[in-house]
Amino acid sequence: MSYKFTKEEAAGLFAKLSEKFDIYAPIRFKDAGRYAETDIIKYGKISSFDEGVYNEKSTYPMKEVLSPIQQALFYFTEDEYRESKCSTKPMLVFARPCDINAMKVQAKIYAGNGGFIDMYYERMRERVHYALLECNADDDTCFCVSMGTNTTDDYDAAFRFTDDAILIDAKDSAFEALVKDGKACDFKPEFVKENITKVTLPVIEDKETLNKLKAHPMWEQFNGRCISCGACTIACSTCTCFTTRDIIYGDNQEVGERRRVSASCQVDGFTTVAGGGSYRKTAGDKMRFKMLHKFHDYKARFKDSDMCVGCGRCINRCPELISITETLKKMNAALEEIKKEK
Amino acid sequence: MNHDIFIKKVRLNCFRESKVPGEFLLQMRCPGGMVDADMLDIVKHISKTWGDGNFHFGTRQTFDICRIKYEDIPAVNKYLKQYIEEVEIEECGVNMASIAGEPAEWDPESGYPTIGARNISACIGDYHCVCADVNTFELARKIEPLIFPSHYHIKINISGCPNDCNKAHFCDFGIIGCAKMEYHPERCIGCGLCAKICKSHATRVLQLNEATGKIEKDPCCCVGCGECTRHCPTSAWTRKSTKFYKVIIGGRTGRQTPRAGKMFLNWATEETIIAVLSNWQKFSAWVMDYKPEYLHGGHLIDRAGYKKFKELMLDGVTLNPECLVAEDVYWHETEYRSNYNVKELSTHHHAGPTEEKK
Amino acid sequence: MFNPIQPKPCKILSVKHETELEYTFRVEYDIKPDHGQFLQLSIPMIGEAPISVSEQGDGWLEFTIRNVGKVTSCIFEKKAGDVLFLRGPYGNGWPTEELKGKNVVVIAGGTGVSPVRSLLNYLYKTPGYAKSVNVIAGFKNEQSILFKNDLENWKKSFNATFCLDNEEKEGFRKGMVTTVIKELPLKDWGEDYAVIVVGPPVMMKFVGLELLKCGFDEKKIWMSFERKMSCAVGKCGHCRIDEVYVCLDGPVFPYTTAKNLVD
């Protein structure tokens, strides 16, 4: 059933939802962008609907709610230690279909790979309920339709914020109980049907082709273009990599923590082993590693999908204007060449 | 050709004499170096009608048109009316019927009333540039009414960031946009790129602490360029919304004592800059004993001495709390001639009203 | 909820100085790993390091650690009675079943001897498990020789050749381990053999090439990969190559897989 709340009723609705949920949404941070007088939009807990940004793609992905850039794993005090704690209150997270689908991609790694379930991810995932946001897909960096991530049914309710009302289509019955005071209406969420940008996914038939693609000169151009800053992977909806780091608090050697901090395969040091050895030293090697993980390796391991939801944030955030969709085209062209050679 | 022209008067009208007697170069002000491209039609019309059909970018971002005949100046001035109205009055809010803040007659068809205050130049600033911290031409437009029209000379250059492409260090009153950075350690992945960039592009105030994976900063020496923010992959560095400026005074070129300017203010806000520059006419008048002559602002500071300059320029100004002020300034001039300043006492210049001399 | 990265404080039972840079720590631990598996050793507030098990016994494991980093240098300050934090074992270990009844070749270089030590000692204590055991172990110089007692035992029971890269010493051959491979009686073994290789990346590369040159079947060779392993449970991504997670699917790979794992 769908319900409508007027602007005046919004505060009451928010209060009611807050009783059950911590509510997360994209929030605008004015002038916090890379360049002067540009903003960023990143996820955070909101205390009123007005704080959220619902009609614009966030700079940083929704994954930060479940797996923040930094989180404590253990706290150490003298010779004792304990696991970091976490609220058990359910979270209502406003998210677009691409971001919701990205969580399925991440879960394969965090909550499954090798038979290990990451407790820190899982305890957050158990709290999460999605409030679906419709997507306007007015940005030519988006290619969710090509990735099959433009729709989802993994949400409690769909929301539409209009100038004078909030429209809610409650899918989950427990959620519906919270919004049934609203005026009945016929709102149904709409999904993106077509993007300006479409991609063809590369088909890598066998190991031999894979290794030929790895050795293809197409990657060399990135040695001059990519600065290996890792902004693409931080902005990525699906990237999961992290580093574990122990720290001591200030000058007290007896207290500290073990924490998890996001890491990037693009940044030097990602593969450095004790003793100093490292792999994939050039920007081209790193870019190749990332692209192949997104469009081959992940699928080769987990079968169902590629490791990209077509959100385009990596394109938006790249300071060197490297486009993942154009890079895909180059991969496809390289594969054609390899095929012909055979 | 037989000419009888009061050159100084024509120069005050922003027409500069040529090596060809009777020909003049018009300098059209363009505060902050930014105008609607429609203005180019006016520039073109003047050049094609009264000039030689060419156009030169003035070194201070004026539109310069050469070879205007002395006889044509009244017609050019009449035609300039629209340009002055749009650029000076509408964009900058200049009171054309004033000189140095005092009411003065001005005929809108008589062209520019003064040449003393030079065009405020600016880099493109954050309107376009990836490095910039501030909008430069908007600031120029706010400053324009404070210094123009006036017979007191001042050259103001505005740079959008401490890279100082527009050479705030080589003018009387240079303004450099900068930013205060905010560090969000919870977003920092310890990649160290900011520290690397700060070392290669700025003042190496950042260091990656390998033990914590976080950045340590020596805040005193941060130049406020924003390179850390520009390069950070996670937005762990962000600019504070308030925009800040450095003021560099007394820089100059010239045949006698060229020098790079020195910092007068650091971390001044726009309000502070506006308040300080509002004292410029008063300061200049005091130094020159209320009799404007062709002398650039930096020389006025020399005559008054930095401490007097500071006293008069900060008079009645409430500095923003972050603002730091130079206690003293030690110039370093190019010594084209050694002991340039050592000469007969009677030839020394005097600053301030004559009554005070007694 | 079970937390797979939760370490457990464990008591150090003894510390043996193998070389100046390599100590063997015997630590209380009640889970028995497979030969060739590794554990995450940590010191709170310093960090974690993946260390392979070099020997195991009832209620204890041994780790032979090379002092090359922040964590290992802190471990080196620990004494018997002190506590180390452990979690694991992780990884796949050596294909012990594949070795049964075979002519087993173990080629190890430097610190690479420690992940095969428990396997070799098992073969030493279990005569008849393998048809024959052939050990080629190389060290840089006299100072870096590890497990002297074990080497003695292996020499007694196995066809063992020990090398020093650049030094003369009694009982050791001067030169690289690669030079010994051609002397293995491959002809006599037919299809009945298995080869294990572990050591620095360069050594493994050249050993691999030499084995193929000498006619060894790539399907009968296993190699242990060294990659940055941080979480050890397939989450952090540091050790991944293609669709393979070295911490989960390795560190031991059949040569047929290993040769295609291009970084």
Image (cartoon, coloured by chain):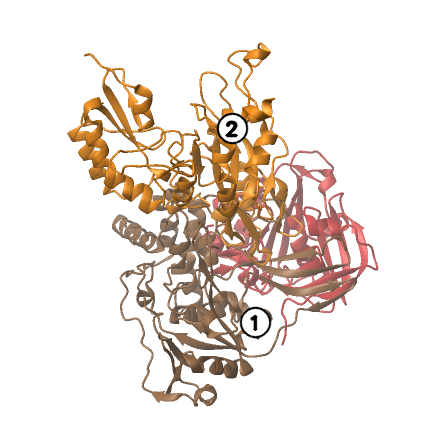
Chain colours: A brown, B orange, C red
Residue at image location 36% in from the left, 63% down from the top: A310
Q: Position of residue C186 (x, y in %)?
A: 54, 50
Residue at image location 34% in from the left, 27% down from the top: B12
Where is the N terminus of chain B found, in terms of image quarters? top left
Q: Position of residue C208 (x, y in %)?
A: 52, 47
- Quick check: C167 above or below B21? below
Residue at image location 53% in from the left, 38% down from the top: B202
Q: Is residue A154 left or right of residue C227?
A: left
Q: Chain of mark 2?
A: B
Looking at the image, is mark 1 or mark 2 nearer the viewer?
Answer: 2
Q: Chain of mark 1?
A: A
The part of the image, by quadrant, that contains residue C46 is bottom right
Q: Residues within 10 Å of mark 1 (few under 14, many from 20)?
A: many
- Asked whether residue A146 appears in the rendered view, the answer is yes
Q: How many marks?
A: 2
Decide which of B160, A79 is in the foreground and name it.
B160
Q: Residues within 10 Å of mark 2 (few under 14, many from 20)?
A: many
Q: Amino acid at mark 2?
A: Gly
- What is the number of the mark on residue A117? 1
In this view, the residue farthest toward the top is B344
Decide which of B34, B214 is in the foreground and name it.
B34
Q: Amino acid at mark 1?
A: Ile
The part of the image, by quadrant, that contains residue A10 is bottom left
Where is the C terminus of chain B found, in terms of image quarters? top right
Q: Is residue A315 left or right of residue C117?
A: left
Where disc 1 sits, the SS reads loop
- What is the number of the mark on residue B250? 2
Q: Position of residue A241 (x, y in %)?
A: 52, 59
- Asked whether residue B35 appears in the rendered view, the answer is no
Decide which of A200, B277 is in the foreground and name it.
B277
